[in-house]
Image: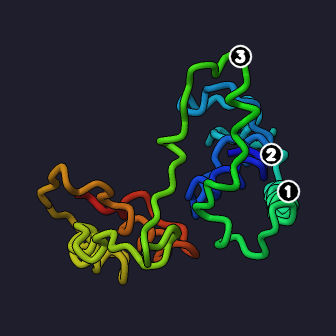
């Protein structure tokens, strides 16, 4: 996903949510050195090194401006196709013009009619209409947060063991948010930590 055209095509194919990753990073100044994991980012985007972080010139306004341009381009495509609301565009495969791609010499022999087929289902939604249960109520983090309550509330050291299974996909994510919120305005001594 980089442009409003990408978003428009995605929506026509049925997407109602979009993930942008590389483009906003580039807007903030990333030069795609592929060194994020080495802590040696030359432009200071993905590093904790104070000297390299001084090189970071990105501003949140740059990303906001980028998304304004993407949204404006989507609005232009919507106007061309006669849509007033984005949700009306979701799943409208019939609005895709595939002739240019099919007539291209590289695409000879490819038939996308089965992929782009839109079945006639009476009363079936073609966009997001109901909430999805992500199972957060059953997340292991609730137990971790309860056991870490003394550390979160009073900054007292805690230590405990919890069995983690392969179905626990995001262990510690909710706990880390609680910890950050609890310590956001404090400078914590290094001796205070949560061990699990």
Return the disc, 3 or 2, that comes first in the chain's sequence: 2
Q: Where is residue 13? Give x, y as percent.
A: 59, 53
Residue 68 seen from this side: no
Residue identifier under label 2: 27
Please identify the quadrant where the C terminus is shown.
bottom left
Camera-side mark, 3 or 1: 3
In what element is the residue under mark 3? Answer: helix
Return the disc, 3 or 1, that comes first in the chain's sequence: 1
Residue identifier under label 1: 73
The residue at 72%/25% (across/down) is 103
Badge 2 density bin: few <14, some 14–19, many ≥20, Cα 10 Å: some
Residue identifier under label 3: 105
From the viewer's perspective, tell me whether residue 135 is left or right of residue 30.
left
The residue at 33%/69% (across/down) is 134
The residue at 66%/72% (across/down) is 88
Alpha-carbon distance for marks 3 and 2? 35 Å
CB contact under 8 Å: marks 3 and 2: no
Dividing the picture into quadrants, the one containing residue 17 is bottom right
The residue at 16%/64% (across/down) is 160
In what element is the residue under mark 1? Answer: helix
Alpha-carbon distance for marks 3 and 1? 29 Å
Q: Where is residue 156? Give x, y as percent.
A: 31, 75
């Amino acid at each position: 996903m980089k442009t409003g055209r990408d978003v428009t095509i995605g929506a026509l194919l049925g997407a109602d949510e979009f993930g942008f990753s590389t483009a906003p990073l580039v807007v903030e100044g990333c030069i795609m050195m592929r060194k994020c994991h080495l802590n040696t980012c030359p432009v200071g985007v993905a590093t904790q090194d104070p000297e390299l972080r001084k090189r970071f010139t990105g501003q949140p306004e740059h990303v906001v401006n980028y998304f304004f341009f993407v949204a404006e381009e989507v609005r232009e495509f919507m106007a061309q196709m006669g849509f007033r609301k984005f949700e009306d565009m979701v799943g409208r495969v019939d609005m895709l013009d595939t002739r240019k791609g099919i007539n291209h010499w590289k695409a000879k022999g490819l038939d996308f009619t089965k992929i782009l087929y839109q079945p006639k289902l009476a009363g079936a939604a073609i966009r997001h209409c109901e909430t999805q249960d992500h199972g957060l109520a059953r997340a292991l983090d609730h137990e971790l947060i309860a056991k870490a309550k003394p550390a979160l509330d009073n900054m007292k050291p805690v230590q405990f063991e919890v069995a983690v299974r392969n179905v626990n996909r995001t262990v510690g994510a909710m706990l880390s948010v609680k910890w950050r919120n609890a310590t956001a305005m404090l400078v914590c001594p290094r001796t205070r930590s949560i061990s699990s």
